[in-house]
Image (spheres, rainbow, N blue to C red):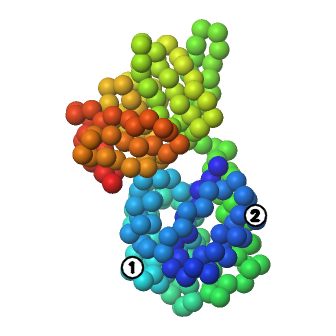
């Protein structure tokens, strides 16, 4: 499942864009906000497959927001589409942040559909198909797991339990240290018994040294010597 972030402070336009995206691909998760700082926090603490950014936000410049998004390694090639009522600014936007296209307000529904179809069919879906996997071998079988579907990993009673969005997988032939080597930089060891996928972080409770993950009932503890790895994502 892909994820799109809409940053637009006009409620009607935002609602219209959400509806078009849902009609094109209802399996996509859509996050929206009218504030640049919230958008930046979302981008840091999640992983998005495309951005729709209003150039003129109430609290910030959409172009400056796009620059900050582009500065993150994970978004170097992520499609960015600007939303604007001033098309002359687009020449600057294309040059500075390599945006994919722009939507002119008030938008033409067919043009928006054409732009989003391209992003969804050739960007997001291809990206989902080419996601990194991890292969875990056991005596009797092997597991091939998409890393983006792993929420967290727990070491308990000399076994490793991998919690994904669909299932729990228990293995006994690996250590957390060995798994961390095979995983992407999205994964962080936050405790001697836990590795978390940073894309699923919902909240970091600094007072109690706990992490709340999306779709997970239990809170994940933060070990004292692992705090430094989480400095960049304190909420």
Residue tagged by mark 2? 24
**Which residue occupies 63% across, 85% down?**
104
Within-10-Å neighbours for mark 1: few <14, some 14–19, many 20+: some
SS of the residue at dot 1?
loop
**Which residue occupies 60% across, 76% down?**
14
Query: Splitting the image into 4 quarters, where does residue 83 fall?
Result: bottom right
- Residue 53 versus residue 210: which sits nearer the camera? 210
The CA distance from mark 1 to mark 2 is 30 Å
Residue tagged by mark 1? 60
Query: Splitting the image into 4 quarters, where does residue 32 fall?
Result: bottom right
- Residue 216 versus residue 95: which sits nearer the camera? 216
- Residue 179 versus residue 100: which sits nearer the camera? 179
Identify whether 7 is placed above or below 160: below
| Residue 152 image label | none
Identify whether 148 is placed above or below 72: above
* Residue 122 picture location, percent across and down: 70, 58
Report whether 123 appears left or right of 160.
right
* Residue 178 picture location, percent across and down: 42, 23
**Which residue occupies 53% across, 36% down?**
150
**Which residue occupies 69% across, 60% down?**
120
- Going from N to C along the chain, the mark reached first, 1 or 2, is 2
Report whether 8 appears left or right of 118.
left
* Residue 163 picture location, percent across and down: 53, 31
């Amino acid at each position: 499942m892909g994820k799109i972030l809409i940053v637009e402070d006009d409620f009607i336009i935002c609602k219209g864009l959400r509806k078009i995206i849902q009609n094109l691909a209802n399996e996509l998760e859509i996050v929206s906000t009218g504030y640049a700082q919230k958008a930046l926090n979302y981008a840091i603490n999640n992983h998005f497959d495309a951005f729709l950014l209003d150039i003129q936000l109430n609290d910030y410049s959409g172009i400056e927001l796009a620059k900050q998004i582009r500065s993150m390694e994970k978004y170097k090639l992520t499609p960015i589409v600007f939303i604007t009522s001033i098309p002359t600014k687009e020449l600057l936007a294309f040059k500075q942040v390599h945006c994919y296209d722009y939507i002119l307000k008030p938008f033409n529904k067919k043009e928006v559909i054409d732009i989003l179809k391209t992003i969804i069919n050739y960007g997001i879906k291809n990206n989902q198909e080419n996601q990194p996997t991890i292969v875990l071998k056991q005596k009797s079988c092997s597991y091939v797991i998409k890393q983006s579907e792993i929420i967290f990993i727990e070491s308990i009673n000399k076994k490793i339990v991998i919690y994904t969005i669909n299932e729990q997988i228990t293995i006994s032939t690996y250590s957390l240290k060995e798994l961390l080597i095979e995983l992407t930089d999205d994964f962080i060891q936050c405790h001697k018994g836990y590795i978390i996928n940073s894309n699923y972080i919902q909240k970091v409770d600094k007072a109690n040294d706990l992490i709340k993950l999306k779709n997970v009932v239990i809170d994940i503890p933060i070990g004292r010597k692992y705090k430094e790895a989480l400095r960049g994502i304190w909420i």
